Image (cartoon, helix red, strand yellow):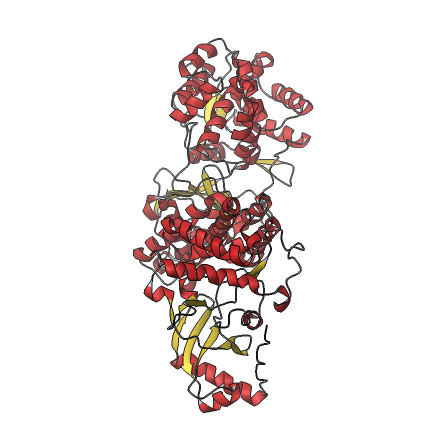
C-alpha cells in the first residue's frame, strides 16, 4: 500500500491565510452537510493553491464542524484524516485530507453527485448499484489494521469476537451519546419511558454469536455519503469517514440497511449481494449471517432512538406551531416503536401522550428564552378543577411555575410508575419541592378505583390525624384537557438521591410507624368521601369485585388462566362462597401499600404513604394484610405489626383477626394469580418495579393460588410454561 502524500506544514502566517479562506468558504461556497459538519465547495485561489500544493482553480471541500452539534454518534477515532490516509491505498477514490485543524478540515473535492439526489430515501436502488455497494463494503476488509490509527483501550482483545464487539458498541453508545446528553434531555427520555440503563442492559443481553474477523467499517453509509461518479469505474464511492470503526463487518451491513432506508422488500437483495461480494474477499465474514444480522439491526434501531428524540425535541425550539409539534411527535413515535424491543421498553407511549410530553418540553424552553414564567409570557394554559378550591399557600402563579418547570425536570426528578408520570420541581416562594402528577394514557387498569385521590388527601389533611401523606396543592387540566395534580413532594430534597422504599421489607421502627399510621387512619371521617360506605359486608363485596374483574379480563388472559388451572368467573364465585370473615367496623383504607408507595424518611416518623388512588372504605384488617402480601415480611415483623395493631385499636376494629387474616391473604394471592398473569399476557406495567418483582415469582403465586382454591394447577405438567411467561 503506497503511503499517502504528506500534508503541507503550515506556518503561522499560512495558517492565518487558510483560516481566512475557510471563513470565505462559509460565506460563499456551495453548502451541504449533516448534523456534525457543514461542507462548502469552492475553487482554490492562486495563493491557497500554492499553500496546499495544488493547481489554482482546483475545487476543494471545506468541512467546518458545527459548534453546537449534539453528541449523537459513536466515534472510534477523532482524526478523520488518519482514516482517509489508511483507506486510500485500497479505495483510491476517497477524498484526500489536505489540511486538518480542530474546527475544520479541507479535503480534495470528489467529482460526482450524491445518490440521494437521484434516488431518494425509501426508493428501491438499481440492482447494478446494489452490487457496486456490496463490492465497496467488501473491499473495506482489505484495509490492514496496522494502517489504521490505534484502537481505544476498551476495544475487544480478540478481533474475531462478535459478541464482545456488539457489547462494546452498546456501551460506547451509552457513554458517548446518552451520558453527555442526559442532563439536558434525561427528563424527556424518562417521561417517554426510556430508563437511564437501557443501553447497558442491552449490552448485557447480547447473545453469543458466530466468530467473524474484524475489518474496517464505514459505519455511516447512507445515500448522502455515496457519490455517483461520472464514469463507469467505480460506479459509487463513499465520503464522510469520521464515524469509521473497526469490528464485525455485519455491523456495517446493518447500519447500511437501516440508514439507506431501502424498501423492506429490497433487504434480501442487498444482503445476498453483500454476502456474495464478501465471500469472494473474506469468506469467514459471512459466518452466521442469517442468525446474527438481526442483532446488529436491532442495535441500530435502539441507538437511533436517542438522536432521533433529541433532534425532534431540539427542532421544536424553533417551531412554535402545531405542524412542527405533529412532525416531532411522528418522528419520536417512529423511533420508539423501532427501538422498543431491543431497548426492552414494555409500553411505548401512544401518540397523544408523546405529543403532550413534547408540548411541555417546548413550552418550558420557550418560557426560559422569553425570560419569564408568567401566564402572559407563553406559559402553559390550564384550567382549575372546581372540586378543589385554590389554596392560599399555592396560588395560580405557583401553578404556572410548576407546570412550566415540569417540562424541564431533570431525569433524577422524573419518576414513571404504573399509572402516573411524576415530575419533581421547585416553585418560587414555596418552601419545599412539589410533584406534578400526570395519569398515563395507555395504562391497562384491571383493579377499579373507588375514591378520588385528591378528596382522600384533603380529608386526611383536614382531619389532622397523624398520617404522613402528601398534601394536594392543585388539580386541573392543561394541554388537550390532560388532567394534572400537584402534590407536596416527600422524597429527599437534593436532586441526586431518588426516594428510598422498603422493597426488601420494613425495619422494626418502620413497621411500628406504619401500624401507627394505619391506626390513625381509622379516625379520618369518610362520610363525605362515600356516603353509602359501610352498608353491606365488605368481604362479600371484595369477593364480588374480584369475580367481576376476572370476568372482564381479555379473552387471551382468560384462556391462558383456564389452561393453567385457574377457574373462570362463575366457578371462582362458587369457590369464594366458602370463605367468610368476622364483621369489623369500616374505616378509610389506602388499598395498595406496596413498598414503592412507602417512602422512607430520616426522622422519627419513618415513612410517608403516597399514591392514594386505590383508597377505599372497608375492613381495617384488609389494609394490613394486603401490605404483608405485597411486601416481603419476615415472621417476626408480621407478629410485631399484628400485636401493635391489636393493642392500639378498639375491639370493634380487630375482633376475630387471628382467624381472618389468613383468609384475606389467600384472597390476595388468588387476585395476584389473575392480575399478574394478565400483565404477563398484555405486557402492561412490566417496567414498574413492584410489577416486575411480582411476575418474576409467578410460578409460586400460581401454585399458592390454586392450592387456596382447591384446584389443580395444570402448569405443573409443563414447568417451562410459567418460566417462559415470567
Residue 120 in the image: above or below residue 476: below
Q: Position of residue 429 (x, y in %)?
A: 49, 53
Please say whether residue 693 is visible from this viewpoint: yes
The residue nearer to you, when weighing 527 against 50, is 50
Q: Percent x, y for residue 383?
A: 34, 46
In the rendered image, residue 518, in percent from the top left (x then y), is placed at: 56, 27
Task: Provide residue 262's location: percent of width, then percent of height.
Answer: 38, 54
Count of numbered badges drawn on the protein: 0
Classify residue 721 as left or right of residue 114. Answer: right
**Which residue ends up furthest to the front in the rendered image?**
280
* Outermost top residue: 578
334 vs 238, nearest the viewer: 238
Residue 139 versus residue 344 in the image, above or below: below
Is residue 306 shown to the viewer in this render? no
> Compared to 156, does 205 lie above or below?
above
Q: Residue at x 62, y 51 (%)?
A: 161
Q: In the figure, 253 relative to 446: above or below?
A: below
Left or right of residue 512: residue 282? left
Kindly identify the residue that appears in the image at 61 percent across and 18 percent down. 646
Q: Which quadrant of the rendered structure holds the C terminus?
A: top right
Q: Quadrant of the N terminus?
A: bottom right
Judging depth in this view, the residue of 464 and 2 nearest the camera is 2
The picture quadrant where one finds residue 596 is top right
Amino acid at each position: 500500500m503506497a503511503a499517502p502524500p504528506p500534508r503541507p506544514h503550515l506556518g503561522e502566517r499560512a495558517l492565518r491565510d487558510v483560516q481566512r479562506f475557510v471563513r470565505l468558504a462559509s460565506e460563499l461556497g456551495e453548502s451541504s452537510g449533516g448534523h456534525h459538519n457543514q461542507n462548502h465547495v469552492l475553487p482554490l485561489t492562486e495563493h491557497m493553491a500554492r499553500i496546499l500544493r495544488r493547481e489554482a482553480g482546483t475545487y476543494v471541500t471545506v468541512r467546518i464542524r458545527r459548534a453546537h452539534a449534539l453528541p449523537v454518534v459513536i466515534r472510534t477515532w477523532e482524526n478523520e484524516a488518519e482514516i482517509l490516509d489508511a483507506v486510500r491505498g485500497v479505495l483510491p477514490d476517497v477524498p484526500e485530507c489536505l489540511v486538518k485543524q480542530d474546527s475544520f478540515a479541507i479535503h480534495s473535492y470528489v467529482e460526482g453527485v450524491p445518490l440521494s439526489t437521484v434516488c431518494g430515501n425509501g426508493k428501491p436502488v438499481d440492482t447494478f448499484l446494489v452490487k457496486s455497494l456490496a463490492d465497496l463494503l467488501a473491499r473495506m476488509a482489505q484495509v490492514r489494521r496496522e494502517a489504521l490509527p490505534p484502537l481505544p483501550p476498551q476495544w475487544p482483545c480478540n478481533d474475531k469476537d462478535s459478541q464482545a464487539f456488539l457489547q462494546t458498541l452498546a456501551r460506547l453508545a451509552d457513554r458517548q451519546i446518552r451520558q453527555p446528553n442526559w442532563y439536558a434531555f434525561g427528563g424527556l427520555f424518562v417521561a417517554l419511558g426510556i430508563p437511564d440503563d437501557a443501553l447497558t442492559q442491552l449490552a448485557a443481553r447480547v447473545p453469543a454469536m458466530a466468530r467473524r474477523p474484524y475489518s474496517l467499517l464505514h459505519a455511516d453509509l447512507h445515500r448522502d455519503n455515496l457519490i455517483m461518479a461520472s464514469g463507469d469505474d467505480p460506479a459509487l464511492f463513499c465520503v464522510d469517514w469520521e464515524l469509521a470503526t473497526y469490528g464485525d463487518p455485519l455491523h456495517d451491513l446493518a447500519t447500511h440497511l437501516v440508514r439507506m432506508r431501502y424498501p423492506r422488500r429490497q433487504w434480501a437483495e442487498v444482503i445476498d449481494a453483500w454476502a456474495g461480494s464478501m465471500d469472494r474477499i473474506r469468506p469467514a465474514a459471512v459466518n452466521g449471517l442469517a442468525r446474527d444480522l438481526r442483532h446488529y439491526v436491532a442495535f441500530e434501531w435502539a441507538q437511533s432512538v436517542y438522536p432521533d428524540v433529541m433532534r425532534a425535541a431540539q427542532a421544536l425550539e424553533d417551531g412554535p406551531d402545531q405542524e412542527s409539534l405533529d412532525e416531532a411527535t411522528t418522528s419520536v413515535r417512529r423511533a420508539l416503536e423501532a427501538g422498543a424491543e431491543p431497548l426492552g421498553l414494555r409500553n411505548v407511549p401512544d401518540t397523544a401522550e408523546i405529543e403532550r410530553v413534547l408540548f411541555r418540553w417546548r413550552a418550558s424552553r420557550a418560557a426560559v428564552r422569553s425570560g419569564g414564567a408568567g401566564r402572559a409570557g407563553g406559559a402553559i394554559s390550564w384550567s382549575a378543577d372546581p372540586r378543589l378550591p385554590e389554596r392560599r399557600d399555592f396560588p395560580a402563579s405557583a401553578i404556572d411555575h410548576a407546570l412550566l418547570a415540569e417540562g424541564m425536570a431533570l431525569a433524577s426528578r422524573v419518576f414513571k410508575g404504573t399509572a402516573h408520570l411524576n415530575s419533581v420541581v421547585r416553585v418560587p416562594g414555596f418552601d419545599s419541592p412539589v410533584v406534578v402528577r400526570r395519569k398515563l394514557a395507555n395504562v391497562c387498569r384491571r383493579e377499579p378505583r373507588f375514591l378520588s385521590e385528591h378528596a382522600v388527601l384533603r380529608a386526611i389533611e383536614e382531619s389532622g390525624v397523624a398520617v404522613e401523606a402528601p398534601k394536594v396543592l392543585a388539580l386541573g387540566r392543561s394541554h388537550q384537557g390532560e388532567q394534572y395534580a400537584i402534590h407536596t413532594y416527600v422524597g429527599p430534597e437534593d436532586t441526586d438521591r431518588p426516594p428510598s422504599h422498603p422493597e426488601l421489607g420494613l425495619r422494626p421502627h418502620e413497621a411500628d410507624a406504619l401500624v401507627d399510621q394505619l391506626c390513625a387512619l381509622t379516625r379520618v371521617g369518610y362520610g363525605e368521601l362515600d356516603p353509602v360506605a359501610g352498608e353491606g359486608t365488605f368481604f362479600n363485596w371484595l369477593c364480588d369485585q374480584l369475580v367481576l374483574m376476572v370476568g372482564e379480563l381479555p379473552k387471551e388472559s382468560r384462556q391462558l388462566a383456564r389452561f393453567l388451572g385457574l377457574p373462570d368467573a362463575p366457578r371462582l364465585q362458587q369457590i369464594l362462597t366458602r370463605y367468610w370473615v368476622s364483621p369489623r367496623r369500616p374505616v378509610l383504607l389506602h388499598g395498595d401499600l406496596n413498598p414503592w408507595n412507602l417512602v422512607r424518611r430520616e426522622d422519627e416518623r419513618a415513612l410517608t404513604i403516597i399514591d392514594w388512588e386505590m383508597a377505599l372504605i372497608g375492613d381495617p384488617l384488609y389494609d394490613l394484610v394486603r401490605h404483608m402480601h405485597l411486601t416481603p415480611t419476615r415472621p417476626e415483623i408480621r407478629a410485631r405489626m399484628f400485636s401493635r395493631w391489636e393493642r392500639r385499636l378498639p375491639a370493634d376494629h380487630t375482633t376475630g383477626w387471628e382467624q381472618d387474616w389468613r383468609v384475606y391473604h389467600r384472597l390476595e394471592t388468588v387476585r395476584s394469580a389473575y392480575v399478574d398473569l394478565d400483565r404477563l399476557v398484555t405486557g402492561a406495567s412490566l417496567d414498574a418495579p413492584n410489577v416486575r418483582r411480582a411476575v418474576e415469582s409467578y410460578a409460586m403465586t400460581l401454585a399458592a393460588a390454586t392450592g387456596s382454591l382447591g384446584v389443580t394447577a395444570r402448569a405443573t405438567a409443563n414447568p417451562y410454561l410459567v418460566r417462559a411467561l415470567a
